[in-house]
Amino acid sequence: MKYKKEHTVYNAENMKVKDEDIVFYDLRCGKFDIHGLYNPYEGDGYRRIPDDVAKATSEKVFNLYKNTAGGRIRFSTDSNRIAIRVKVPHVTIRPTLTYIVTLGCDLYVETGGIDVYRGSFKPPIDMHDEYEGIIWVGEGMKEITINLPLYNDVDKIEVGVAEGSVISPHRPYTHPKHILYYGSSITQGAAASRPGLCYEAWISRKFDCDYINLGFAGSAKGEDAIVDYMTTLDISAFVCDYDHNAPNSEHLEATLPKVYQKMRAANPDIPIIFISKPDIHFDYEDCIKKRTVVMENYSKAWNSGDHNVWFVDGASLFGSDGREECTVDRTHPNDLGFYRMAQSIGKMLWTALFMERR
């Protein structure tokens, strides 16, 4: 493939880190905290769930479980530059996703108690299996968070700092017990422009809480294998958001009660939040039926005496003003859509987790 001359600045060779004093460390060397991934310090590549669970769930989940959605690198350093080197087994290209959200990473620096975006590590236009990038972050000790790609497998990651720099642990999350999100491509992060703008990342920054993203594009259908695995996790809340991937209302009606019952049996005291899909089309009969199934399951749990269940009506997630501007394709949220989702779901989580219960 030929590239126009004006684009050569974005090719792999030109985007390599040229600073000779940058020292790279493998992410698994023990200097960095890895969040949101399953057993991240062992095995080949990175994954969100165990291999056997992925295989037992479905072929589609097996194709997606090594996508590093929700994965984060956290550490403290006095280096004035942060570099990264990412090696991948293949390159994902989707018409509704940016290169940065599929393959890239973005970096935040804690400033005044708030994580502030400082830049993105951008894959080159001629990306094959590896890319590098570097971001200036300023002098002094800093708390760093790097969000990993949402829609691509990752084989290896190296983090670079200026030679002689200190690398120490990031301070712990204020709320370190994971919030678990399970759902569709929207849950996985399509179509945010970069990893840090999926709704779970917004919520994590706002409330300083850890999380696990088990969004599987087109593939979250409440299967027993994945649900049984989720019951083994030590979590603070469960957000159930797979309305979108249920093939029809009958499937949702058959699986959602089991998902709720298994998660509640394993976690008697946590909030369970039911969400219906945000891009509801009121002229599609099955959209209405699936929304009704989600509402009815919430109501049934509440009426049976479980007062730690919550419901977020997907029809309200994008708001009313500018609702039609919240997606890239009438389905997947853009950054505005994810921001509005984060506001609504985050408010519900804050009430359910940290305020006095009803």
Image (tube, helix red, strand yellow):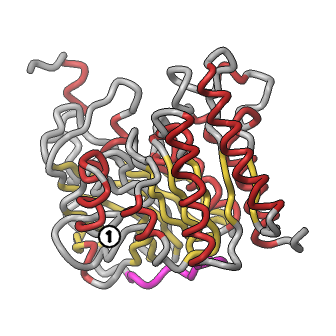
Choose between 3 and 315: the one closer to the eye.
Answer: 315
Counting from the top left corner in percent of width and height, residue 32 is at 37, 78
Task: Residue at 63% x, 61% y: name it.
Answer: 205
Counting from the top left corner in percent of width and height, residue 31 is at 34, 82
Q: Is residue 259 left or right of residue 162?
A: right
Choose between 54 and 29: the one closer to the eye.
Answer: 54
Q: Is residue 296 visible?
A: yes
Counting from the top left corner in percent of width and height, residue 334 is at 55, 31
* Residue at the left extreme of this rendering: 1
Choose between 267 and 292: the one closer to the eye.
Answer: 292
Q: Is residue 286 left or right of residue 3?
A: right
The local secondary structure at tag 1 comes to: strand
Residue 167 in the magenta stretch? The answer is: yes
Residue 231 in the magenta stretch? The answer is: no
* Residue under numbered circle 1: 161
Q: Is residue 34 above or below residue 315?
A: below
Name the image quarter holding residue 28.
bottom left
Q: Is residue 238 above or below residue 311?
A: below
Task: Residue at 27% x, 41% y: name it.
Answer: 123
Q: Is residue 136 visible?
A: no
Q: Amino acid at mark 1?
A: Val
Q: Is residue 195 above or below residue 218?
A: below
Choose between 252 and 176: the one closer to the eye.
Answer: 252
Q: Is residue 151 above or below residue 279?
A: below
* Quarter of the figure with the C terminus: bottom right
* Label 1 Cα crowd, 10 Å radius (few <14 / some 14-19 / many 20+): many
The magenta span reads 166-177
Number of marks drawn: 1
Task: Residue at 18% x, 52% y: name it.
Answer: 88
* Quarter of the figure with the N terminus: top left
Q: Is residue 282 left or right of residue 235?
A: right
Counting from the top left corner in percent of width and height, residue 26 is at 22, 73
